[in-house]
Image (spheres, rainbow, N blue to C red):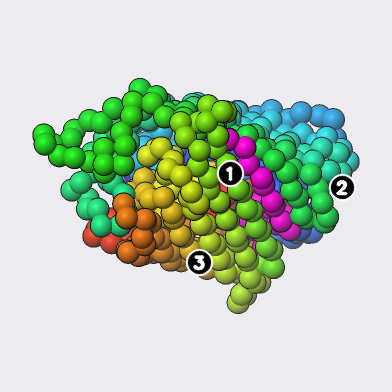
């Protein structure tokens, strides 16, 4: 735990710029009144004190101006159970394409990650809002050199069945959404997943893996178009407040004439609801993330799997890729509460459950997870927290999970 504590302190001291530019979707973001800031304390206030600066002189940098691009970047450590320690070089751009009172903030993030387990990650994530939020352009582009442990299909697999699969991965997801009505958007997208140089390592002689039973190949491609529907009244995506609601449905159809190995389609349903509960600021958050293959056979490495949502947050309590199957059902609840009156410290308790279809395409096993964590207010203006959670699951599975911002 001492190592994790030190890591979290290092994280606090190095990700300052990114936290400053990702605080909210718009200037009118349900932030506290200016007088409330004086009663609050965050990690940046403490850093100011350490370096001999007056924290009362800080400016609310979440209120950016139209027409100016704000760049920030820094090296930073990170940690995930699948990667171990990570050395991260991160850069971000934030800007408004219209009046900040009527236009949400646009952002582009570029990271270079090299991990303790010799993995290389190069993600580029973008969310570009046009003037008055008429259009939203969402991008998720990645290159991964990614040896990882996998376990097989379904919920009957054991920890002893783990072995390493090494591969290179290119992802290109790009969506354009148009405003249909207040908080509701619809649009289309392109989704391409390309895995190559795939190889299985450390497999016992004579063993036939689930990957081989399903259909092993040294390369795989999924390429298709998608329909995307989004409703969200969440003002601050890094720390949603009680009363907010989010729903995103993505229908994906892959075609061989677009380069896909075969025709297959899927549905992704991501729904989140936040309730005010107990003392002021406490929130009960509910989340369902259902990832369903509707027809056809995705390549093995494109199957629904825990920890492969956009921000790698499903399945706290289990290592990424611990479970996989053609269909995934997932639910989670989390209670978020304050600890210190000045807002610096908070806590959470959470529980989740997930199920994946077996090779026979039936749900047979429920995989529960639970845990607790602390929250350290990093930026009181954007209400950004550093989240450090300990989660555990069945058969001794456990891990520490660190995020900048809430998990969902």
Name the foreground residue: 214 vs 408: 214
Closer-to-camera residue (158/358): 358
Quadrant housing the C terminus: bottom right
Q: Nearer the viewer, mark 2 or mark 3?
A: 3
Under tag 2, what secondary structure?
loop
- Is 344 situated left or right of 25 in this image? left
Please name the residue that numbered disc 2 is placed on: 101
- In the image, which disc is placed on residue 27? none
Residue 293 percent across, percent down from the top left: 48, 50
**Marks 2,1: beta carbons within 8 A:** no
Quick one: SS at disc 1? strand
> Which residue is disc 3 drawn over?
333
Q: Which residues are magenta?
A: 224-241
Q: Earlier in the sequence, mark 2 or mark 3?
A: 2
**Residue beneath disc 1:** 252
Determine the residue positioned at 52% across, 31% down: 256
* Image height of 381 relative to 36, above or below: above
Image-based side of 252 in relation to 182, left or right: left
């Amino acid at each position: 735990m001492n190592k994790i504590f030190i890591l979290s302190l290092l994280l606090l001291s190095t990700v300052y710029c990114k936290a400053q530019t990702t605080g909210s979707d718009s200037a009118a973001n349900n932030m506290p009144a200016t007088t409330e800031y004086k009663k609050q304390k965050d990690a940046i206030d403490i850093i100011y004190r350490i370096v001999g600066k007056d924290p009362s002189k800080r400016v609310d940098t979440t209120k950016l101006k139209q027409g100016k691009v704000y760049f920030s970047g820094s090296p930073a450590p990170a940690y995930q159970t699948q990667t171990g320690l990570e050395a991260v070089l991160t850069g971000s751009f934030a800007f408004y394409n219209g009046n900040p009172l009527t236009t949400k903030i646009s952002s582009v993030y570029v990271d270079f990650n090299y991990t303790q387990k010799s993995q290389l990650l190069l993600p580029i994530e973008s969310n570009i809002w046009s003037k008055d939020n008429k259009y939203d352009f969402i991008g998720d582009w990645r290159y991964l050199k990614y040896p990882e442990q996998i376990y097989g299909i379904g919920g009957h697999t054991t920890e002893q069945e783990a072995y390493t699969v090494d591969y290179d991965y290119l992802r290109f997801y790009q969506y354009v959404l148009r405003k249909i009505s207040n908080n509701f958007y619809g649009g289309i997208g392109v989704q391409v997943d390309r895995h190559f140089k795939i190889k299985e390592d450390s497999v016992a002689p004579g063993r036939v893996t689930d990957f081989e039973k399903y259909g092993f190949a040294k390369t795989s491609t999924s390429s298709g178009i998608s329909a995307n529907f989004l409703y969200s009244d969440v003002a601050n995506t890094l720390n949603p407040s009680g009363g907010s609601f989010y729903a995103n449905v993505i229908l994906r159809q892959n075609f061989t004439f677009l380069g896909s190995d075969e025709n297959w389609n899927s549905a992704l349903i991501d729904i989140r609801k936040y309730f005010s509960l107990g003392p002021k600021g406490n929130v009960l958050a509910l989340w369902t993330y259902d990832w369903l293959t509707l027809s056809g056979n995705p390549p093995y490495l494109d199957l629904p799997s825990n920890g492969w949502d956009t921000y790698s947050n499903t399945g706290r309590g289990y290592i990424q890729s611990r479970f996989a199957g053609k269909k995934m059902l997932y639910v989670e609840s989390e209670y978020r509460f304050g600890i210190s009156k000045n807002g610096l410290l908070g806590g959470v308790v959470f529980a989740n459950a997930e199920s994946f279809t077996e090779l026979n395409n039936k749900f047979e096993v429920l995989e529960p997870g639970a845990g607790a964590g602390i929250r350290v207010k990093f930026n009181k203006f954007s209400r950004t927290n550093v989240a450090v959670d300990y989660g555990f699951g069945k058969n001794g599975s456990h891990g520490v999970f660190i995020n900048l911002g809430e998990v969902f």
